[in-house]
Image (cartoon, rainbow, N blue to C red):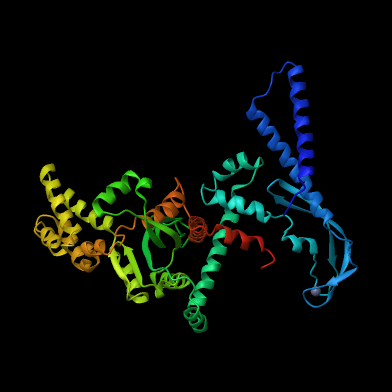
Amino acid sequence: MNYNMETINHMAQQLGEMFREAVMEQSKAGEGTPHIAQIEHGMREVLRQIGQQALGMFLSSMQATPASEIDCRCGGKLHYQRMRTAQVISVFSGVSYERAYYAGCPCHRGKAPLDEQFGLEPGAVTAGLAALLALAGIEFSYDQSPKWLQDFLLFDIAGNTVRSETEKMGELQKMLEAELVQHSQDETQLQERERHPGRIPPRLYGALDAAKVRIEPRLKKGGKPAEHEDWRDMKVLSWFETEVVPPAQRSVRQRKKAEREHVALRAKNLRHFCDIIEADQFGKLLWATGCSLNADLCRELIFLGDGAVWIWNLVSRYYPKAIQIVDWYHAEEHLELVAALAFSDPQERSRWLEDVTQALWDGQVEQVIRTCQALASSCPDARKAANYFYTNAERMRYDRFRAAGYMIGSGSVESACKQIVTHRLKLPGAQWIVEGAVYTAKARAAWLSGSWQALCDRRSSLPLAI
Ligand SMILES: [Zn+2]
């Protein structure tokens, strides 16, 4: 849209003049000159009020002369009743407007065409405000977000409104994912994709992980709450590509990494997906989102994960040709645990750890297994670690993976778990019902994936879409 600069200049001049007069008056009354922050706040408040009135006037002015009758969705006719006032909650707070209302069809439906034209739902939040509320809701707890929003919007919003708008975004994301799943199971669609695949990334990574979410105790029979807290696994999948970090942009950690690995990689084009569902169901999402990125058509597809069995089962099932790598940091952690439990002497401990970590780094998994087994009789966790390295040996050929230039640490998905689950779902005192946790996490994952705008666009076409 283009706006008339002359009108803007004129209005700005008037506004500036109005503030000058108000400030002069205040000084004259001996109350001193207000600070710039007070002026800014005052000006924002005035602009909000102007927006509130202007939006109402604009909407009312868009109402054309009403026709005496219009078509009803059922095929019948709706008759003009009268002009009716409606209210919506916009980014400027409550806005009233007048529009023509039609009724009288035998199907008993009523209709205000202006509402449909602008996607307005009387009594509800506009799409513009909804996007902002959801943005607060993916970042702050539903108790805290109203306080934060008050400072930005200059009016009060209930925590429950923030919750429902945020969850609506998550629900929309879930619908988008369901569509992907449907496409990925449709033979015709799959064939079409193989003919016109679009961009195929030369090297694509998938990383899988899970984090615990505290769920409200379910009621036992008789209405008594369950004694134990209920924790559920939020599974997180991240797709990404990598790029070499230019030396000048390297962080301290990346510099250290680069010294060790001779190259520093960072993730780009990250897409995160998450859900609280069984592995089988999550597999469908893994396949569907992979299809949308042509994961199965990639020359090199690499999966990173910890040792969790569900992860490698899904990867083997859906992407049998993919390269499987146990995340370096997870593998290293197992050695650290053994070192901490098996040695009381700090020097002995660090010498052991240094040697065995080097062996792991060099892909000498058999040596790592032997080293752990040697401690097994006195340390049960060393036995467990030996089993872990034995089971995942082929996923720990770090010498080969490094030689091929692969990223061997899934820092990106671990931070996805942290960013999605820890940062938002584990805020102090947070307790969730499964659906609320899933929708909030999905909305947050969409935002972190850079697909927020797509959700907002979908939200704008509501409520017409439903
Ligand atoms: Zn009708």
Residue 345, given in percent of the width and then of the height, sits at: 11, 43
Position of residue 247 relative to residue 177, above or below, is above
| Residue at 47% from the left image edge and 80% from the top image edge | 194
Name the quadrant containing residue 108.
Answer: bottom right
* Quadrant position of the N terminus in the picture: bottom right
Closer to the camera in the image, 439 or 394 = 394
Position of residue 320 relative to residue 306, above or below, is below
| Residue at 61% from the left image edge and 54% from the top image edge | 131
Closer to the camera in the image, 462 or 261 = 261
* Quadrant position of the C terminus in the picture: bottom right
Q: Is residue 154 left or right of residue 135?
A: right
Residue 338, given in percent of the width and then of the height, sits at: 17, 53
Q: Is residue 62 left or right of residue 195?
A: right
Q: In this view, does 395 lie to the left or right of 247?
A: left
Residue 235, given in percent of the width and then of the height, sits at: 40, 62
| Residue at 70% from the left image edge and 34% from the top image edge | 43
Q: Is residue 230 visible?
A: no
Q: Quadrant of ligand 1?
A: bottom right
Residue 154, given in percent of the width and then of the height, sits at: 66, 40
